Amino acid sequence: GSATMMRVRVRGAADAVGTSVGEVKSKAGRITRWWRGFFAAFRFRKIRRFRAWMETAALSNKARKDEKELEPEADLSLDLMDFTPEEVKQYQEISAGEDLTPTAEYLDSLHRFTDDGRRLNSLSRYSEDYWTINLMNLGKSRVFKRILPHLRANLLVSAIVATFYYKYPGMPTLTGPVHTITGSFMGLLIAFRTNTGYERFWEARKVWEQIQNRCRNMARIIANYVVGDDQMVLRVMQILTAYPYALKQHLRGQRNLEEMRRVLGDRDVALLEESSNMPQTLCMMLSLTIRKLLVNSAGQIENQYLWETLDRHIQELVSHIGASERLATTPVPLSYSRHTSRFLSIWTLTFPFFMASYCHPYISVFAYGFVCWALFGTEEVGHIIEEPFGIPRSKKKADANGSKQDKEEHNTENLPLLRYCEAIKYDIEELQGQYSLLPTTAPQCTISYTTIVVDNEEEMFIANGDQDKWGQSRDPSS
């Protein structure tokens, strides 16, 4: 009888366990199906929005095309009356069947964000429509990966403190306004740290904007106002194309001569190989190239104003080297960074003792993790954006064979220097193509100048009796 009762009890227990397991599986299946349906609806909504956007864009392009067909076609061609018959024929042969609009490769290069292929278009910038994607990609965040060791250590301390207060609930906790007051000071420190990093980032961008403008202006001036010396024009454009690449390598501590061979000859590359400052060497090459604009073969001074204009641009290029070096080699003061890091670490390590009196110990672990993620992430953003040229704050030491690479060496890059270099290269190459279509001769005029001293100040007058813009004679003899 007892054995029968035991078998009945075991069978009943097994049936109960089977029923419980079945209910759990059923609930898990319903939850899984609900989540799958939710994400399927989310993806369908995105696809539907994308299709609607594509249809709208197609209709807009069709309407634009119809309007263009109705309007008279504008004559955007060059005035061929300014060219010789041979140049007209050359222009027609070059431009026959050629689409002069920007190529897809050029537009794609303008959209490049960094050298690893991330893009600087609307999809990469923050948008309210992509908050779910940003939230789901939290684990892939560069900031999150960098703060993860610090975050793990603090979560471990928080779990130990939570277990201690769970077993001994009567133990005293930290109370009072200490963390509230110090938290305000810490917030100011972190905000100032982030603002300082952003100022460095934006200043670096302005420096490279000026570099782009200088290179384009020099190429334009040399192509339009130097007549009859094609070798000098092409030589200057060649050096201007190589300058941004050399500066990029100089700021990163690199020396990629193969990249320089794309735009320079072997003799120039050999000279750069021996140079410790490649962009400065290129500026010296520019000065030597344009020197014959000032002094001709007979030793006479001519084209002084043109030479001074180009030399001022070269001086600014040298100044941009110094400005970039200042940003690359002068970080935020180490004492400020260390004090902020120590303050933040002590504040977060003592925060679990303060949280234990407000909620359940184990619930406080999750709240504590969120607070640490927000604070550590904001501080790390300041560290990342203060390095606009991708210079690492710490490099891993190579092993004896030199095979160990610092994979994070240039992952902190914020400014797309390679994209800027490619944009300058494309623009100068386009100017070279336009220069080949310009007239080979131009009307020459010689104006003599006379410098006189008036009240200890030098003034330069046109000595051929011309009038200034107010209609007054500028002849010093009058």
Image: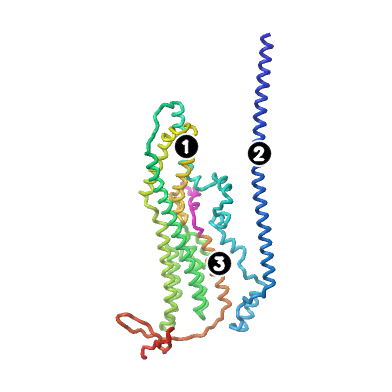
Magenta stretch, residue numbers = 397-416
Query: What residue does disc 2 label?
Result: 34
Task: Please tell me which of labels 3 and 2 falls first in the chain.
Answer: 2
- Residue denoted by label 1: 155
Q: Is mark 3 on a helix, strand or loop?
A: helix
Give percent across and percent down for residue 422: 54, 63
Secondary structure of residue under mark 2 = helix
Residue found 57% across the figure and 45% down from its top: 136
Q: Name the residue under label 3.
A: 426
Report the amino acid beneath label 3.
Tyr
- In the rendered image, the quadrant that contains the N terminus is top right
Q: Give the dominant element type of the magenta stretch: helix, strand or loop.
A: loop
Q: How far apart are marks 3 and 2 (CA)?
A: 52 Å
- Mark-to-mark CA distance, 1 and 2: 32 Å
Q: Which amino acid does label 2 sit on?
A: Trp
Against 208, is 130 above or below?
above
Q: In this view, does 88 lie to the left or right of 449?
A: right
